[in-house]
Image (spheres, helix red, strand yellow):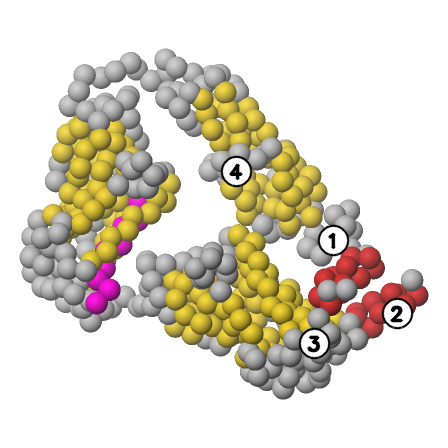
Amino acid sequence: MKKIIFAIIAVLAAFNAHADRMYIDNFSIEAGETKQVSINLDNSSALSAFQLELYLPQGLSMALDSRGRLRCGVNADRADDHILTFKDRGNGQYNATYYSTNSYDIYDNSGEVVYFYVSAAEDFSGTATVSLKEIYVSDAAGNMTQLDNTTCTVTGPQPVNPPAGPTSMYINDFSIEAGETQQVSINLDNSTALSAFQLELHLPAGLSMALDNRGRLRYGVNADRADDHTLTFKDRGNGQYNATYYSTNSYDIMGNSGEVVYFYVTAADNFTGTATVELKEIYVSDAAGNMTQLDNTTCTVTCSSTPGPEPGGDKATSIALDMSEFKTTETALVQVYPTIEPAAAASQEIAWKSSNEEIATVDTHGRIKALKPGKVTITATTTDGSNLSAQCEVTIMMKGDMKEDFTIDISDMNSIINIILKK
């Protein structure tokens, strides 16, 4: 026990005496690109292991290999029998551990020590920050030091606004029957050559993009205007969908008017009257990458069938959450998904509540934000008068609390050392 205490004292004493640094250099990446990124270690003394948390911004994620594993590797010039592992913690957070099974030192004292591959989403643009946090390094004797957090800037495609021509993207007014699924065109009228676009599609309550038999959003491209162009739609929730259309070889969109892509929309059984469909945040670009933002456009959709029963006839009979309990750590953001039966209940709206908002909060979408250690109950309640509810018990731990007893002590520190050295 005395040896452990002395070892921990040595660890703590070394915290402020170390001048080592781990960092990522600023880098740029194109939308849709996968790129190798180095993690560098500049060390003034011999080290054999480290662990850290990698935080990637929205629009970036670690790439996977053909077997679905995170792509990463070690710099052989600085490694002996060292092993690197990355684990996906969710929400853009990844945990990295690097160690030698025989406690050999890391070679040299500067530059790349490991690397990983990062992929940018098709709609990634602008600048963002990548962070390395909770960085711990240790020498062959097990002495551990926490290093300062570091950040770098990643740069994606930058919007450039050339002189705007009379270019417009729009949907024509259309009608649909309650319960019907229908193909809807998105049109592009352009006076100059364009090769790509991205936009947000906003559908009103009662309308949603249809799914195919594999649960994927249904959409397609007009072959008369496409070359090697690719279209993707992503469901952002609350009736909002993001569309990206581009050519892998920067070929121009053919023609200069009319339908360029289409999607399928489904009307709920209780959809009635008229509503508005919107195209927003519309950006078009030419083959050179010059980007222009177009004006938002709207169209009117009309229900052409006889209205069905007024909402409120069928109340929910049950509500359930996809998790009844879970554990997480401070600052984590966790999504809980509800299911209301029957699926055709007049209202799918839910009221969310946290039993202690000092420990964790929950928003109107069921996203739980962990604030500090403790236990809290998240309750989801129907709002259609049925007053049904479901609960999820959440336990929030301190980072480094290996025993999960809401305290950080010598045994927790020893467990961290053992993990890094793989004793």
Quadrant in which residue 26 is drawn: bottom left
CB contact under 8 Å: marks 1 and 4: no
Q: Nearer the viewer, mark 3 or mark 2?
A: 3
Q: Residues within 10 Å of mark 1 (few under 14, many from 20)?
A: some
Question: Residue 48, labelled with which disc?
Answer: 3
Q: Are marks 2 and 1 in contact (CB under 8 Å)?
A: no
**Residue linked to disc 4:** 336
* Residue in the foreground of this view, choosing between 270 and 343: 343
Q: Amino acid at mark 1?
A: Met
Local SS, label 2? helix
Q: Secondary structure at mark 3?
A: loop
Q: Earlier in the sequence, mark 1 or mark 3?
A: 3
| Camera sees residue 121 | yes
Contact between labelled residues 3 and 1, with CB atoms less than 8 Å apart: no
Left or right, 317 with reference to 314 = right
**Which stretch did the figure color magenta?**
240-249
* Residue 73 colored in magenta in the image: no
* Front of the two marks 3 and 4: 3
Total labels drawn = 4
Residue at x 82%, y 57% (from the top left corner): 411
Which amino acid, by three-letter code, is at mark 3? Answer: Ser
Residue at horizontal 66 percent and vertical 37 percent from the top: 376
Cα separation, mark 4 vs mark 2, equals 44 Å
Residue 293 horizontal/vertical position (percent): 22, 58
Task: Name the mark on residue 6.
Answer: 2
Residue that carries the numbered disc 1 in the rendered image: 402
- Residue 287 falls in image quadrant: bottom left
Separation of residues labelled 1 and 4 (CA atoms)? 25 Å
Residue 209 location in percent, x, y?
Answer: 28, 37
Sequence-first tag of 4 and 2? 2
